Structure formats: C-alpha cells, structure tokens
Amino acid sequence: MKEVIRMTRKAMERAKVMEMIRTKKITQRKGAEKLGLSVRQVQRIYQKYLEKGDEGLNHGLVGRRGNNNKDEIRELALELYRKNYQGWGAVLAAEEITRETGAKICSQTLYRWLREEGLWERRKKTPKHRLRRPRKASFGEMIQKA
C-alpha cells in the first residue's frame, strides 16, 4: 500500500520537473527556466529530491503543529474559570487568568472557548422601557393648555 503525501501545487509542479530531470528529458537549466529559479537552486532542490523523494520537495514545516498551540492554555484557562471565576464576564476573567498564569489570553478568545464549552449563555436584549405615542391624524389635533 502506497503512502499518501500531502503536497502543495508548487511542490507538485516541482515534482514533475524533477522527475523530468531525473529521466533526462530536460536539463537542469531548462528545469530552472520552467520553475523560475536559478540553476543553483534547482541543483539544491534536485539533491533533496534524490535523497527524500517527493516528500523532500515540501516545505520543512508541512504537517507539523504551529508554535501558537493553545490546547494546554485553553484547558488551564477553562479550569481556572470553572474553579474561581464562574459567573464573571469574559473581559475581567481573561485579565485575571492572564495575571494568574502569565499567558496572555484575549477576552474574545476566552469568550469563544466559554461558549464552546457551554459555560456562557447569550443574554437576550430586554425590550425598551418607553413606547412612542401614536401619531395624530392631522396637524393641530393635540389639546393645548394655556
């Protein structure tokens, strides 16, 4: 069974050109022209292609998690909210959690996390207190007091 490799369009185009270079259908110079790179860059990419295959054409960070990983922070923030800040608003709770943990949490992010966990319910707007008086049919109909 073959392994599936996720590739960008750019990497797929490079793979086609590198395969053509490998089978000697085109030269590295022609490959460089096709890809819009210098010959030296094509040589470097070709060496990586020979060592790692198609996977070597992908960017080195493809498939890895980013540095902005908030799973641990999210769990900690939600635990603190449940324990200490239940019923507080998202802005004040985010400030207190930031002060306590040192991890900066945006109030909107905390608000989204709380809604996803079911810890925050939207409040319905209350109706306006005053009602407008109905308009009179013609001008001058209002009672004038002297």
Image: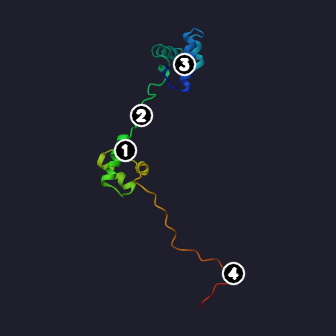
Disc 2 marks which amino acid? Gly
Q: Which mark is residue 130?
A: none
Q: Secondary structure at mark 4?
A: loop
Depth check, mark 4 against mark 3: the one in front is 3
Asked if disc 3 and disc 2 are in contact, CB closer than 8 Å, the reply is no
Mark 4 or mark 3, earlier in chain: 3
Disc 1 marks which amino acid? Arg
- Choose top left, top right, bottom left or bottom right for residue 131: bottom right
Residue count near mark 3 (Cα–Cα under 10 Å), binned few <14, some 14–19, many ≥20: many
Mark 3 or mark 2, earlier in chain: 3
Q: Residue at x 64, y 84 (%)?
A: 142
Q: Which mark is residue 74?
A: 1
Q: Residue at x 60, y 77 (%)?
A: 133
Q: Which residue is mark 3?
A: 15
Q: Which mark is residue 66?
A: 2
Residue count near mark 1 (Cα–Cα under 10 Å), binned few <14, some 14–19, many ≥20: some
Q: Which residue is mark 4?
A: 139
